[in-house]
Amino acid sequence: MPFNLPNILTWLRILAIPLFVGIFYLPHSWLSPTGQNLVATLIFAGAAITDWLDGYLARVLDQTSAFGAFLDPVADKLMVCAALIVLVYLERLAAPIALIIIGREIAVSALREWMAQIGQSKSVAVSFLGKIKTTLQMIAILLLLYHEKIGEYFDPQQVGTWFIYIAAVLTLWSMFYYLKAALPQAMKH
């Protein structure tokens, strides 16, 4: 395992997961519900920023590695899955939506692993649709975590719910896109 800044940032994302989840188990005498929402939102935002930053630094510093390429998406999926489970627990997200997103992540990860084993990983490389889905999903999760109204008119819960539903539709669409791309190889093997 290469010990470099991009990989350290990825490990920090993974290590932040118990802290992120644990925030919601603190007694309200230690941290109010509003404080829990804010701290969890900041932790998740930090994780989202380091997700972008570690890839950027790996390229700029020429510190890319096979281990980093493996660990980065694992860290992303762990953090997103943890956030979705927390949101279901807090009754801010419907369980079927979380299951759609988590199920797709598992299915596409398995598909990518299989395609890499047969030397066809480029046919299921991240698409533009997948990037849009991820962006909407991250914004939705941030809004749903924050939860508190901002001003008189902006309701993060409502906007986050719209975004997560759109992200769920894009999740299914992108999964079918990846399955269609992999189908010719599946028929050969």
Image: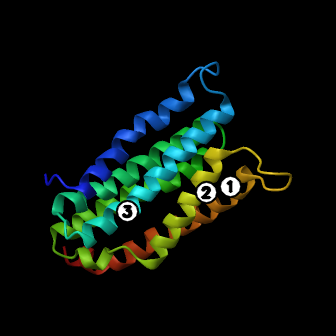
Q: Residue furthest right?
A: 152
Q: Nearer the viewer, residue 38 or 80?
A: 38
Mark 2 Cα within 10 Å, few/some/many (few <14, many 20+)? many
Image quarter of residue 145: top right
Helix, strand or loop status at disc 3: helix
Q: In this picture, is 62 found above or below 70?
A: below
Q: Is residue 20 left or right of residue 154?
A: left
Colour mode of the rendering: rainbow
Marks 3 and 2, how far apart at CA: 20 Å
Residue drawn at x 38%, y 73% is 178
Q: Position of residue 2 (x, y in %)?
A: 14, 55
Given contact means CB atoms under 8 Å apart, are the residues at marks 3 and 2 in contact?
A: no
Given contact means CB atoms under 8 Å apart, are the residues at marks 1 and 3 in contact?
A: no
Task: Indicate which disc, 3 or 2, sits on the residue closer to the N terminus.
Answer: 3
Q: Amino acid at mark 1?
A: Thr
Query: What residue is shown with label 3?
Result: 53
Q: In this picture, is 10 found above or below 23?
A: below
Q: Is residue 57 left or right of residue 176?
A: left
Q: Position of residue 142 (x, y in %)?
A: 59, 52
Residue drawn at x 57%, y 46% is 41
Residue 39 marker: none
Q: Position of residue 118 (x, y in %)?
A: 16, 71
Mark 1 Cα within 10 Å, few/some/many (few <14, many 20+)? some
Query: What residue is shown with label 2?
Result: 140
Helix, strand or loop status at disc 1: helix
Query: What residue is shown with label 1?
Result: 161
